[in-house]
Image (tube, helix red, strand yellow):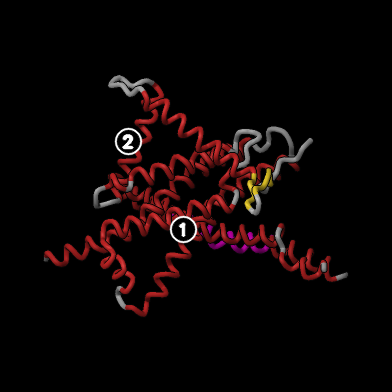
Amino acid sequence: MDSMSLIIVVSTAVAGLTMAIGGFGPAQALGKALTSALDAIARQPEASAQIMRTLFVGMAIIESIAIYAFVLALIILFANPLIGYVAK
Amino acid sequence: MKTPEMFPVEIFSIGPVVIKNTVIVTWFVMAFIIVASYLITRRLSIKPGAFQEIFEAIIESAEKNIKDMLPVSPWNVIPFITTLWIFIGASNLIGLIPGFMTPTSDINTTFAFAIISYSMMHVFGLKTMGLRNYLKHYTEPSWILLPIHFLAELTRTIALAIRLFGNMLSGDMIAIILLGIAGFLVPIPFSLLHIVIGIIQAYIFGILTLVFIAGGIRVEQNKNISEEV
């Protein structure tokens, strides 16, 4: 196997792993955040508007970790800088 | 069949400035919003028609949301945040029309939005607190934390841009990949999800900018209270 195809194989495998591992943590965190928010709303339905707003902001911040993993996977797949070293 | 584009394409260039199709779509969105706002606000009446009713509902709900979050004079901030909501929301949703590239799935657009919100954060902070007080809050609780403050502002601005970009690009990408492997009508449920995500992301972009602005302003409020007591 020459170095080019080695890079392609490793990049493809790692892109999948990036999404799998990078999606796992945020998914757990989002589930936890949603459960606690639902608990809080069940206890205090009159505060639901404020809880929902805080929940959205918090979820956006948690979700950005998954988005980082996604962007990284995209860079590995479509704009891999390592291929440039070998292609010369 | 012409495959739909996933990444922005160059249309023409003026010298070193490259104009991509996302920029053209952004101009189109801007023109559409400006013309629509002009036509609707030209003849305001006490008994509103359907379009005026819709616009009033948008502005009123935006006002209600912002007033809850901001302790001081919300009318300085309401035009800016509402513009962000309407413009980003329209940009996110226009990609559903065939032939239009989603402008926010280009990282340059989202970074432009993030830079605007970063600058406005400082502008509103300076406006309400004055230069001295504003620069002072960087050295609190200790001047050793000064680089951390700068780093935090930089990373949250970059996170703002990357979040919008990643969400919009992933929505487009899922539709294109499903169109490739499964074909006609299959991407429609995912497009419905994309509508929800587009609106939520526009809301989140605005509300996070608002939280950052409020965070810059609230420092002085606390100080006033502690001085009074």
Q: Position of residue B42 (x, y in %)?
A: 37, 25
Residue A39 percent location from the top left of the image = 37, 52
Question: Residue A32 location, x and y as percent?
Answer: 45, 58
Residue furthest to the left: B229
Is residue B189 left or right of B164 when viewed as pictured?
right
Residue A61 marker: 1
Amino acid type at image mark 1: Ile
The image shows residue B142, relative to residue B206, as above or below, that is below
Q: Gap in Å between the C-alphas at discs 1 and 2?
A: 27 Å
Q: Chain letter for mark 1, please.
A: A
Q: Which residues are magenta?
A: A16-33
Secondary structure under the numbered disc 1 in the rendered image:
helix
- Point out the image quarter for the N terminus of chain B: top right
In the image, B105 versus B180, the foreground residue is B105
Please tell me if label 1 and label 2 are on a single chain: no
Instruction: Tell me, yes or no, if residue B55 can be seen here.
Output: yes
Task: Tell me what residue is drawn at x 30 percent, y 73 percent.
Answer: B140
Q: Residue at x 50, y 60 (%)?
A: B159
Left or right: residue B181 versus residue B145 is right
Near mark 2 (Cα within 10 A), the count class, few <14, some 14-19 or many ≥20, is few
- Residue at numbered disc 2: B60
Disc tally is: 2
